[in-house]
Amino acid sequence: MLRRSKIVDSRVLLIAIIVAVAGMLAPLPTHAQSDSWTPPYPMILTPERALAFVQAADQKLDYLPGEVLLKFKDGVTPVGQQRALMALRSRPDVSDLHWLGDVALFTDQRERDATVLAAQLSAQPEITYAEPNYLLHKMSTPNDPSFASRQWNFSAIDLPRAWDINTGSNASVIIAVVDYGITDVNQSFTFPSWDGAAIRSVSVPFAINPDLQAARLVGGRDFAFWNGPVLDMDSHGTHVSGTIGEDTNNELAEAGIAYQARIMPVKVCSGFWDVQFELSASGFRGFVPQNVGGCDAATVAQGIRYAADNGAKVINISLGGPGASLTLRDALAYAAGKGAFIAIAMGNEFLDGNPTEYPAAYARDIDGVMSVGAVGRSLKRAYYSSTGPHLEISAPGGDDSDGGAAGEIWQATISPFDSDSRTVVFPRFDRYVEKPEEGTSMASPHVAGIAALIMSQGVTKPSAVEALIKATARDLGAPGRDDEYGYGLIQPRAALRGVGVK
């Protein structure tokens, strides 16, 4: 899996090339053309996997082509597993399966329609379920930075008075951010990339968010790019982590909710630069599509289980997609069973038919897992925020139709002037700015941060944390729980004063 190989020309022809990009504002060291690249750490994102992300983007697929997740029934032997696999025309060997706990990931190079593969495997008596390896995406929409009032979101939920009761949680609580990563190293790495005319090697600097103490980052793990330090090449994970627990009295002004808790960066997503660097290293001469990347269900499930197994008491998942994945459902149930409370972004698809998004849809049926919708500055449902019977709670997510940029969620994150793939050829990820974003991606970390405050008060059961949040919410919309706001707007001070529920 980790061996580097060249991409053949027939595959390269499938990639949609984007050729118009501009230079970055601040120069980096001189670029020298490179014919080969040796990564400093074993790669997880192989050229074949990177190409699958490109194909998914180009064909607008909600799964990775050729990849299927399957779970065998209890007691099925390797002989029975092999018999089930023989239903596929590629006749794979059971040794080709990549095991993720009790779920297996299989990649078929002959049949790329994963829905066909899943249907064929689901019909076999040895298999409990088979499903495409669905793609999830971040639930946020960035806007350009501007100077305006900040962090109305904390006043809207009376957070300053909640801090009078609990000063930002404590170091005994670990919050896992299962996302595009949070950079946990100050270091430069050499990556190859396309400059519009040639593949060149460039020294790309990375730095830890100056508003997040390095000592508070613990147990980081990359499941998406390589077996090395966690690197955020997208900025989404960094922004989310800021709301959860950015330092107070810091360099860029914003604060986070649980500013004394520890944060676990768990990278499960591949963004534009992850894919661009890997394909350039394989000899692909061109730019990958702007919408390339995402978070496949198999990798997200790995990240959830890893976080629960390694001490996370709170997990935030600001990701979602239309594919119903039993693999993700099982991972959520596993983590909650291990004692982790989980907050999940509800989705931003209200104006696009309001489809059910996963894994948020599973929250209603798992104690200790909550789906989170978004409100704007006036505490009305944000225009984009998905609704439905599975919505459980609301939190500030920002709404640019309700106050412009000042009505969005501001946190420190990686400078878009240095890393935006639409305007930058060779990026850098070592400079941070205040940046507004909106989405249920921004609402979910409010709930995760407040769950950390509650847990540091001694409420340790995820189901009890959920019960407190629901019972103390401020009712919005129709009386009682409704499909637009769930149980209402989260109220941290009231929840903290309700300590005693076990």
Image: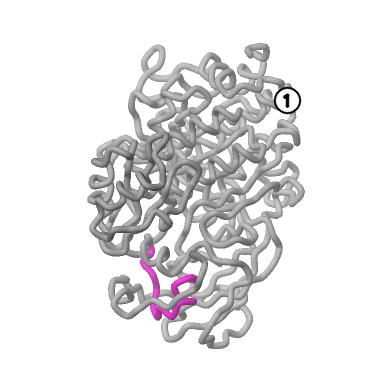
Q: In the image, residue 325 lies at what x, y percent?
A: 37, 40
User: Does residue 288 belong to the magenta stretch?
Assistant: yes
The structure's colour scheme is one colour
- Residue underneath mark 1: 166
Question: Main structural element of the magenta stretch: helix, strand or loop?
Answer: loop
* Residue in view at x 74 percent, y 52 percent: 214
Q: Residues within 10 Å of mark 1 (few under 14, many from 20)?
A: some
Q: In the image, residue 430 lies at what x, y percent?
A: 64, 64
Which region of the structure is painted magenta? 277-290
In the picture, residue 25 is in which quadrant?
bottom right
* Res. 19 visible in picture: yes
Q: Nearer the viewer, residue 28 or 47?
A: 47
* Residue in view at x 61 percent, y 21 percent: 461
Image position of 312 (left or right of 435) = right
- Name above or below for residue 358 compared with residue 273: above
- What's under tag 1, amino acid-wise? Asn
- Name above or below for residue 41 compared with residue 488: below
Name the secondary structure under disc 1: loop
- Name above or below for residue 50 compared with residue 453: below
Q: In the image, residue 240 lies at what x, y percent?
A: 56, 44
Q: In the image, residue 317 lies at what x, y percent?
A: 50, 40
Residue lying furthest front in this view?
79
In the picture, residue 210 is in which quadrant?
bottom right
Q: Which of 272 and 150 is in front in this view?
A: 272
Q: Nearer the viewer, residue 245 or 191?
A: 191
